[in-house]
Amino acid sequence: MGEEIIILSNGEYLLLKRAIAKILYKNNYEQSKISKILKLTQPRVSNYISSNIKIPKNIKGHAEKIIEKINNKHPVEFSTCITFSEKHGNYFLADKNELISNEKQKIIDNLTDAFLLLKGKDITNLLPQIKMNIAMSTDNPKSRDEIASFSNGFIIMDNKISSTTGIKFGKSKHLSSLLTYLKSENSSINAIMNIKLDNKLLKSSFRYSYFTKNYKLKEKKKHIDILLHKGGFGIEPCAYIIGKDAIEAAKKVIKLIEEV
């Protein structure tokens, strides 16, 4: 007997998981179990369950069929496919940034969860004049194409992070170059987020240090949470939150919101 396959675009795929999470929760599935079934973190499951986003009828139909299989103990797999843009003869061609490895998918998921943690938070005191963004890299990035960030940074409404325009590898040249350099100094640093430079940061509970004018570490300390850059001609003063991943960086920002 053959296997049934449903192929959806990325937006539809996320709506499908959202629909499945909501229905399973209504059917008394615990969030921890939904997390395992959908291969999502619990923060994202919680976000999906509480979401009021309208689900199209065709997506609901797919979700109900999948839940029927789940309830009947049939294995259900969720996989990320390559997206193709051009057809040449019998073959489609994909840009190299469209090839999603397991490692890259984990980065995309981590960045998504970081955004969900930050969504709706009032960042009035931490909002820089330039675009606010967060970037995360693979373990051993050889180029910018192995560092992901939000395509055009966070979309801010009423001083709150409201949405994004999607995650892509090879974007945010500035954060990518900083992250590549920082990883060469400390391999445990995998994520970076830019915020406003404010003297109140110096009074926070986090450990800080400084960048030189050329964005090199002024001091090589083992444990740093925030790096400060005083700016220069045509360069806005800025602070950078670093972490082992995007979620950790986001949690530090949330704590800073409470402290600053």
Image: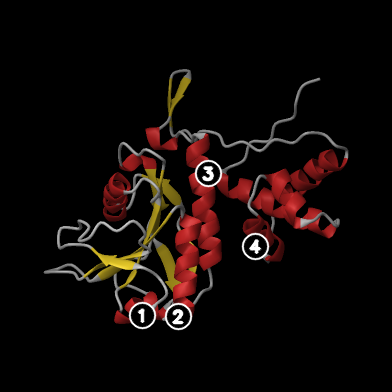
Q: Are marks 2 and 3 in contact (CB under 8 Å)?
A: no
Q: Measuring 54% from the left and 49% from the top, which residue is drawn there?
A: 109
* Between marks 2 and 4 in the image, the one whose residue lies nearer the viewer: 2
Residue depicted at x 22% and y 62%: 211
Q: Earlier in the sequence, mark 2 or mark 3?
A: 3
> Looking at the image, is mark 2 or mark 1 earlier in the sequence?
1
Would residue 44 be visible to someone looking at this image? yes
How far apart in space, not on screen, are marks 2 and 1 (Cα)?
9 Å
What residue does disc 4 label? 47
Nearer to me, 166 or 59: 166
- Taking the image as drawn, is residue 160 in sight? no
| Disc 1 residue crowd, few under 14, some 14–19, many 20+, Cα 10 Å | few
Mark seen at residue 169? none
Report the quarter where the N terminus lies.
top right
- What kind of residue is marked 1? Lys
Q: Circle 3: is it few (<14), some (14-19), or many (20+) Cα within 10 Å? A: few
Structural crowding at the residue carrying mark 2, measured as other residues with C-alpha within 10 Å and reported as few (<14), some (14–19) or many (≥20): few
Q: Earlier in the sequence, mark 4 or mark 1?
A: 4
- Label 4 CA crowd tier, 10 Å (few <14, some 14–19, many 20+): some
Judged from the image, the secondary structure of the residue bearing numbered disc 2 is: helix
Which residue appears farthest toward the right when viewing the image?
72
Mark nearer the N terminus (3 vs 4): 4
Task: Kindly indicate whether the residue at mark 3 contacts the one at mark 1 (C-beta within 8 angstroms).
Answer: no
Q: Amino acid at mark 2?
A: Glu
| Residue linked to disc 2 | 259
**Closer to the camera: disc 1 or disc 3?**
1
| Viewer-nearest of discs 4 and 1 | 1
Q: Is disc 2 in contact with disc 1, using a CB cutoff of under 8 Å?
A: yes
- Residue at the spot 81% in from the left edge and 42% down from the top edge: 65
Q: Which residue was labeled with disc 1? A: 203
